[in-house]
Amino acid sequence: MAATNVDTDFLLRIENALDQIRPYLEADGGNVKVLEVTDDMVLKLELLGACGSCPMSTMTLKAGVEQSVLKAVPEIRSVEAVNVVPIP
């Protein structure tokens, strides 16, 4: 857990939500790492492994990761990756 600008319980809720989607990411050789939660409640993630270079990572982020987090942690307004590869 890398983010230091939120309390431990809040970060644990985020990590638990991410743990629900991680098996699917790991099955394809990827993962995510929490970097920060901004003051406007935007969760910033780093895409790791295959997720960092996958052209479908934007779809995975929005359809899978973001939905899992928003469902479990409604305080989060959106999820963004700092290293998304744009779809050509």
Image (cartoon, rainbow, N blue to C red):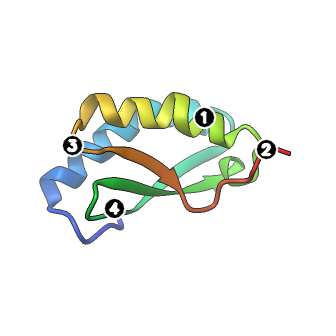
**Number of numbered discs visible in the structure rendering:** 4
Q: In 3D space, how far apart are the residues under numbered discs 3 and 2 (Cα atoms)?
A: 29 Å
Residue of label 4 = 1
Point out the image quarter for the C terminus.
top right
Whether residues under marks 3 and 2 lie with C-beta atoms below 8 angstroms apart, the answer is no
Q: Which residue is mark 3?
A: 75
| Residue type at the position of mark 2 | Ile
Specify few, some or many for label 2: CA neighbours under 10 Å numbering under 14, 14-19, or 20 or more: few
52 lies above or below 64: below
Left or right, residue 23 beside residue 54: left
- Residue to which mark 1 is pinned: 60
- Which quarter of the rendering shows the N terminus? bottom left
Of tags 3 and 1, which is closer to the observer? 3
Q: Residue furthest front?
A: 40
Q: Residue at x 67, y 42 (%)?
A: 57
Q: Position of residue 45 (x, y in %)?
A: 47, 56
Sequence-first tag of 2 and 4: 4
Q: Which residue is mark 2?
A: 87
The residue closer to the viewer here, 37 or 49, is 37
Q: Of the residues shown, which amino acid type is indicated by label 1?
A: Thr
Callout 4, which amino acid?
Met
Name the residue: 44% across, 37% down. 66
Name the secondary structure under disc 2.
Answer: loop
At label 3, the amino acid type is Glu
